[in-house]
Amino acid sequence: MRTPNYPGADAHKWAAVDDYFSELLAPQDEALTNALSANAEAGMPSHDVSAVQGKFLALLVKLMGARHVLEIGTLGGYSTIWMARALKPEGRVTSIEIDPLRANVALENCRAAGCADKVDIRVGAASDVLPRLEGPFDLVFIDADKPNNPVYLEWALKLTRPGSVIVGDNVVRGGAVVDRRSTDPNVLGVRRFAEMLAADPRLDSTALQTVGEKGWDGFTVSFVKG
């Protein structure tokens, strides 16, 4: 059981349920478990998506028939592997990571998982890399520094097309998102991000709370309208 980012009194039950469904519906092979171990050995925080969340992203890729996926925030490539494996043969995940060490670990993890040929890891601040990308992307997964979520959303809209999907991770933050008086830059970034989702006529969005091995959090899903 990983240490939850936002624990609760029932965290052990939430983790047990995640384990139950993961074993049945989202089993991890050796490459995925080794990726998590490699990330820990490199000193990375355990911010990777859970196995069932990784499977959710993979199913989104399959359901959409996505060929071009953009991931903002690679970390050690765990979620990257889930999405890359779900792509069509000609598909590619373009993933942005600011830390060169993490990017190198992620690339090695992708090689070990047999999907490095479907992954393009760009090293640098996302605000610098995004203007150099060419869309459209079918799916955008935003999972980086939360204060910049509004910037990432603006670029996601520039780099997508009608019918694309934008997913924003870690938006509940243990319930802190509802605190209007918060001065936490992460909370402020998420709240502004949510307000932008609500106000933009190009988007049809919802948010889902989650509990599990990562504690109490959630994500947004947005459909880019025609």
Image (tube, rainbow, N blue to C red):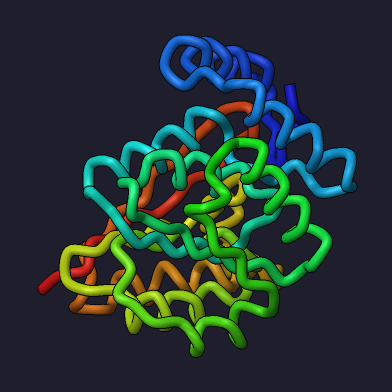
| Residue with the most extreme left position | 226
**Residue drawn at (33%, 37%), measured in percent from left and top?**
59
Identify the image quadrant of residue 70: bottom left
Residue beneath the point at 77% across and 58% down: 104
Where residue 212 sits, quadrant-wise, is: top right
Image x and y of residue 192, in percent: 48, 75
Residue 135 vertical position relative to residue 79 in the rendered view, above or below: below
**Image-quadrant location for residue 38:** top right
Query: Is residue 90 toward the left or the right of residue 190 in the image?
Result: left
- Image quadrant containing the N terminus: top right
In percent of the image, x 46 and y 72: which residue is there? 193
What residue is rendered at 72% in x and 47% in y? 108
Q: Quadrant of the C terminus?
A: bottom left
Q: Position of residue 41 (x, y in %)?
A: 89, 39
Judging depth in this view, the residue of 90 and 136 nearest the camera is 90
Tell me where residue 79 appears, x and y as whole percent: 55, 45
Q: Position of residue 28 (x, y in %)?
A: 57, 22
Q: Nearer the viewer, residue 163 or 80?
A: 80
Residue 70 relative to residue 213: left or right: left
| Relative height, residue 115 to residue 31 (above, below) | below
